[in-house]
Amino acid sequence: MLLASLLVASFVIFGALYLAPGNPISALSGGRALPASSLRVLEQRYHLNQPFLAQYWYWLENALHGNFGISITLQENVSAVIGARMWTTGGLVLYAALIILVVGIGSGIIAALRPGLADTSVLVSTAVSAAVPSFVAAIVLILMFSVKLGWFPALGNGTSFISNVRHFTLPAIALAVSSLAIVARVTRAAVREEADREHVQTAISRGIPARQMVRRHILRNAAIPITTVSGITIASLIAVAAVVETAFSLNGLGAYLVQAAASKDLAVVQGISLVLVAAFVLINAVVDVLYAVLDPRVTLGSRAQ
Amino acid sequence: MSAAIGVSARRARSAARGGAVGLLRGTGNPGLVSAAVIAVAVALAVIGPLLAPYNPDLPNLSLAWVGPAGGHLLGFDFEGRDVLSRLLAGAQSSMLGPLAVVAGAMALGTVVAIVAAWRQGAADTVISAGLDILFAFPGLLLAVLAAAIFGAGLTSATVALAIAYMPYVARVMRGAALKERGQPYVAALEVQGVPATSICLKHIVPNMLPLIVAQATIMFGWAMVDLAAISFLGLGVQPPAPNWGVMISENQPGILQGYPLPALTAGLCIVSVVIAFNVLGERLFEQAQAARR
């Protein structure tokens, strides 16, 4: 299933851009008229005289060997550019995922187990932050923490690990804001549902310490919905990262993809789209494996209804 | 059997007659407040351009980044245009885009779901597999791809998002449609020789209406965020056209220069409308789920 969806996705990406209006030759020549002999050389080099399926096959074969062609605007190897920028996007998504897991699940558990003020404040603040788009969060964070307080740099990447962490903090928060609200709300609902179940009431009446009860009887059972929503939201960050990278002028894959789309640099669009879709599908597959680890009743290969 | 048909018709009728008022009554105060915010936003989308006190497109560079002053309640943007006028005029494209996305995704998703649920078997398997593949494309990525192919603009972004949201609609609706398909009244109507399309349109869709409305409401919030993000990236609505997402991106330099008002007010418009749709949608969803049980 994983391979099938990747294959179809790659076909869709290649096919869609194959259909794009505009002639690849004129993009290569910059619109100049070329003599027939150079046209033939170019057609041969890029397999443009071959049927569509053959072109797709060349592209896919090269892509699997890590060769995505040449960026027309940068005159650089696309895979080199992807390799150089991958770490920015990966680091950003990882950092944001960490924030989502710690703050989102943490506040969800607190809200579920402490009705009253804590619960209400989590509910209200998540209702607001769920509606804050990443780029709005970005401008508010830059305004507060870079311009007013001067704690974090507003734009750009860092040079070392420590300075990268400083540079990525605001972008990661901006990326995490709305997703962590969703994770917090689902965690709260899941924990509350488990806490009301009979086996937990029994455990309370048997006098099992609260901490142990939460960990062993509530969280273990609530883990499935929490994992589902965390996986989905973290996977979706891969696409949203483009917005945050643009807002903070980070040199990540997404920001480059957007520039390439605007300048119709199709080799770059194809390459980065394929990498992003692959990462997206892969994270979802990891979540499926996690289900089986978390819940022995789930066997791999069975499909949830 | 006739009793079952009576129940179906009654449920459908009460949903249809109660309409918006009937659905809203059960959502409580937060739901009503959200509905009011949405009503204001819709009104602005319709008549906003007429309310704009100044020409939203008329630049005056000598007034760039000037704060609120005499009749200009929210001051001026980076080109010296009246911010309030641009917010009012921008409501139209900011609301119309998500509406088109939601309408497209709901129509496609519901039709696909009902076909899958009605036919079952091979059709259902093929549709479900197709949906699984579509799930591999995040909405934003599809919109960027569409911009690369068809050029930047609201139309390509809208079509791309409608396609990307379709599987989410179809998954929810397929479950509901399957349940409805198994109801005795459907079998009764089939035995009487009522054509499938008419059973679907006159009975199954009306009975799913509360769920459809709830799903559409929640999705409007997503669509607004995603479309504004695409416009922020420069691949959606093109400046100088007024739009809330565009206003944030073109006034972003003001944040660093200590003049954040134009970008922040546009952000506030987006956030308040999205909160309203989220809160109302969540409550409508709970209501629809409770009614189904």
Image (tube, grey):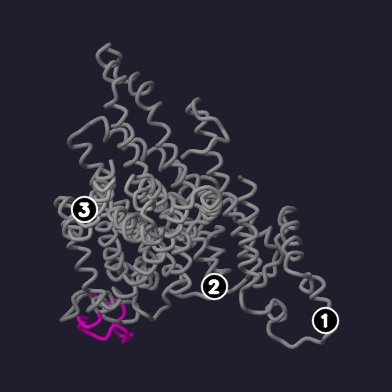
Q: Where is residue B211 in the image (x, y as percent from the top left)?
A: 31, 53
Q: Does the magenta stretch include residue A98?
A: no
Q: Where is residue B273 in the image (x, y as percent from the top left)?
A: 26, 62
Residue at x 45% of width, y 49% of height: A166
Q: Is the same chain shared between marks 2 and 1?
A: yes
Disc 2 to disc 1, how far (Cα)?
28 Å
The residue positioned farthest toward the front in the image shown: B192
Which residue was labeled with disc 3? B10
Question: Taking the image as drawn, is residue A11 in sight?
Answer: yes
SS class, disc 3: helix
Checking the image for residue A38, the label placed there is 1
B198 w.r.t. A264: above or below: above
Q: Which amino acid does label 3 sit on?
A: Arg
Q: Give the range drawn in magenta.
A: B49-67
- Whether tag 3 and tag 2 are in contact, CB under 8 A, the answer is no
The residue positioned farthest toward the top in the image shown: A206
Q: Counting residues from the N terminus, which is met first, the one under dot 2 or under dot 1?
A: 1
Q: What residue type is labelled 2?
A: Ala
Classify mark 3: residues with Cα within 10 Å, few (<14), some (14-19) or many (20+): few
Q: What residue type is labelled 1?
A: Ser
A81 w.r.t. B4: above or below: below
SS class, disc 1: helix
Which residue was labeled with disc 2? A262
B34 w.r.t. B84: above or below: above
Is the magenta region chiefly helix, strand or loop? loop
* Left or right: where B21 falls relative to A27: left
Q: Is residue B54 magenta?
A: yes
Report the chain holding disc 2: A
